[in-house]
Image: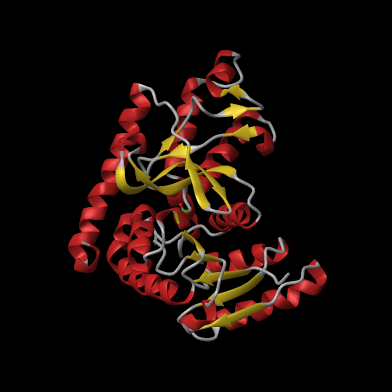
Amino acid sequence: MSRRKIALIGAGNIGGTLAHLAGLKELGDIVLFDIVDGVPQGKALDIAQSSPVAGFDAKLTGGSDYSAIEGADVVIVTAGVPRQPGMSRDDLLSVNLGVIAKVGAGIKRYAPNAFVICITNPLDVMVWALQKASGLPTQRIVGMAGMLDSSRFRYFLAEELNVSVEDVSAFVLGGHGDDMVPSVRYSTVAGVPLPDLVAMGWTTQARIDAIVERTRKGGGEIVGLLKTGSAYYAPATAAIAMAESYLKDKRRVMPCAAYLTGQYGVNGLYVGVPVVIGANGVERVMEIKLDAAERAMFQKSVASVRTLLEAAKALDPAFA
Ligand code: PYR
């Protein structure tokens, strides 16, 4: 059996980290694509030269022509510009929309059977635009954001409660913006819900509220520290987990920006919700019951995504 092919569109910091992780996990052969000739080839060669010591077998190549991604099983898109200090993800809309239109055309032509994961920001609108531009079925295009936001939430909770990150389960709903909805009621430590841990005196509601707020601003905190771009280790790790669930048909339940057709009262938008990812892509949306306060927060977040989507349509009539 030949190896699966993983195409990474964008060979910047996230793209390079994706390639390294995909190699270390032996997910398949890897091709890095970037319009900046030399960068994808250089990163591919560098990572390939680490494989004898790290002990993985994978063919790594780089290219600057979309034909390089031909026949890919998985495509992960990071192309576009990251935000800089003082910017919101929404400030990237205009420039990244143009990039995504080209990427979508490349996928449509060379990798129409792939499972596609979008990381480019502003995430929920970019994944919508990528689906439109590529024409791929909606269940085969998802956005990576919920996994990242949930990982940040889990990490902060594990630190606060002084327990292993492995025992903290949590997820974040809604759009990948500052009004995302980290779910406190559905977060657990070894199955024990967070509100019970507050009642047990392991932490306080005020500290949980602060963690929720820190999670919402998690991406901005990294941008502020780096000063030259945005996070890449955690985003890449989250996307690789999604790719692995697809390639190995693991059917993991993961929060992702998925196309909704009425679930959660949302139609025709990509928004972060828990989904099952298996060999068919997004196999199922898990529609959890929200209480009144959670529903109000979720609807506010969805309204932000919708407003940005309308702005995207106004910018480029091809998406209208
Ligand atoms: C984040 O760090 O949240 C990004 O969106 C890259």
Horizontal and vertical percent position of residue 311: 21, 57
Residue at horizontal 54%, vertical 59%?
232
Instruction: Name the quadrant containing residue 158.
Output: top right
Residue at horizontal 66%, vertical 38%?
165
List the single residue furthest toward the top: 199
Q: Is residue 72 left or right of residue 162?
A: left
Q: Is residue 161 left or right of residue 10?
A: right
Front-lying residue, 258 or 146? 258
Q: Is residue 173 above or below residue 243?
A: above
Horizontal and vertical percent position of residue 79: 44, 69
Q: Is residue 44 above or below residue 189?
A: below
Front-lying residue, 72 or 204? 72
Residue at horizontal 55%, vertical 23%?
194
Horizontal and vertical percent position of residue 196: 57, 17
Residue 87 shows in this picture:
no
Quarter holding the N terminus? bottom right
Q: Is residue 219 left or right of residue 243?
A: left
Horizontal and vertical percent position of residue 4: 65, 68
Quarter holding the C terminus? bottom left
Residue at horizontal 35%, vertical 35%?
264
Residue 315 shows in this picture:
yes
